[in-house]
């Protein structure tokens, strides 16, 4: 299993390395715009939970970016399936379904971590220093694990890039704005909060933010992320098996 997962992961990393010089600027654009538009417009005038809005915003951007960039591995899988037919070659190779999912999930998590490093550098340029402790990175890894696992499963189910775009529009985009990234969840109506707390990104954002401020995140949120990620991972293995059939 280890050799198969390493081979899949190594292939994705080779592709990532060749594109890195173009990806890093693209990873910088959205966070930079959010920091300028929201940070400067509200950062000096608004305090949220005892912190400036800029300090509140950056952990939310980290949670959102770890979600979107981990989920972006689904696009790479679709390209490999529909255009390069790499998935057909993997079917013929001695690579188990578990190894394939493991390699792709690790690749998605790697992309997410690299994108987060970009945001941390941008935060330093804006004068915001966060506590990047073990809890901080654990919450990021769990969030990336959740959405990379979800991405692999959904990539096996879609039939075209149009389907992939549809899933992103209805799953990822709403979660990005409702998961406590830009505004405190407590500001929403009570009935809405109950729905929002069902979203994994909400638990990731609150955990990352708490750790970034030097506090210990709620263990319940970390456990929820771990359970959801494990469930998505298992479903992805089943989806890969079904796609092979």
Image (cartoon, rainbow, N blue to C red):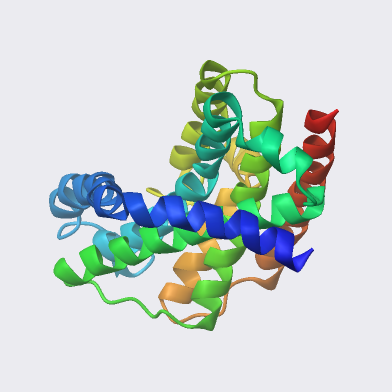
Q: Residue at x 68, y 38 (%)?
A: 89
Residue 158 at x, y percent in the picture: 65, 23
Towards the viewer: 147 or 197: 147
Which residue is located at x 21 percent, y 52 percent?
35
Residue 89 can be seen in this image:
yes
In the displayed structure, 26 sits above or below 160; it is below
| Residue 102 quadrant | bottom right
Residue at 40% x, 48% y: name it. 183
Q: Position of residue 93 (x, y in %)?
A: 76, 46
Residue 198 in sight: no
Q: How many numbered marks are there?
A: 0
- In the picture, measured across the screen, residue 8 lies left or right of residue 186, that is right
Left or right of 133 in this view: 220: right
Give the camera-side residue of 38 and 107. Answer: 107
The residue lying toward the viewer, choosing from 167 and 56, is: 167
What residue appears at the point 60 percent right and 42 percent down from the top-left corner? 196
Tell me: residue 240, above or below residue 98.
Answer: above
Residue 1 in which image quadrant: bottom right
Considering only vertical position in the picture, is 189 above or below 127?
above
Residue 171 falls in image quadrant: top right
* Residue 23 pos. (x, y %): 30, 49
Image quadrant for the C terminus? top right
Q: Is residue 182 left or right of residue 10?
A: left
Q: Is residue 31 left or right of residue 157?
A: left
- Residue 71: x and y, percent? 54, 43
């Amino acid at each position: 299993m280890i050799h198969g997962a390493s081979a899949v992961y190594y292939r994705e990393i080779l592709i990532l390395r060749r594109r890195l010089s173009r990806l890093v600027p693209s990873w910088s654009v959205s966070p930079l715009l959010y920091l300028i538009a929201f940070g400067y417009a509200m950062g000096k005038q608004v305090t949220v939970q005892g912190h400036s809005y800029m300090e509140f915003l950056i952990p939310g951007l980290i949670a959102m970016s770890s979600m979107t960039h981990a989920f972006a591995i689904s696009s790479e899988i679709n390209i490999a399936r529909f255009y390069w037919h790499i998935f057909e070659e993997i079917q013929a190779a001695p690579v188990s379904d578990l190894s394939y999912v493991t390699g792709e999930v690790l690749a998605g998590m790697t992309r997410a971590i690299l994108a987060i490093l970009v945001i941390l550098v941008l935060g330093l340029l804006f004068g915001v220093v966060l506590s990047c402790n073990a809890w901080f990175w654990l919450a990021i890894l769990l969030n990336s694990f959740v959405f990379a696992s979800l991405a692999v499963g959904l990539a096996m189910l879609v039939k075209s890039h149009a389907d992939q775009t549809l899933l992103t529009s209805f799953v990822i985009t709403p979660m990005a704005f409702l998961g406590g990234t830009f505004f405190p969840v407590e500001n929403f109506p009570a009935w809405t909060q109950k729905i929002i707390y069902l979203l994994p990104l909400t638990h990731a954002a609150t955990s990352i933010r708490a750790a970034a401020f030097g506090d210990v995140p709620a263990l319940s949120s970390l456990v929820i992320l771990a359970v959801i990620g494990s469930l998505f991972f298992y479903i992805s293995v089943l989806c890969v098996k079904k796609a092979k059939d």
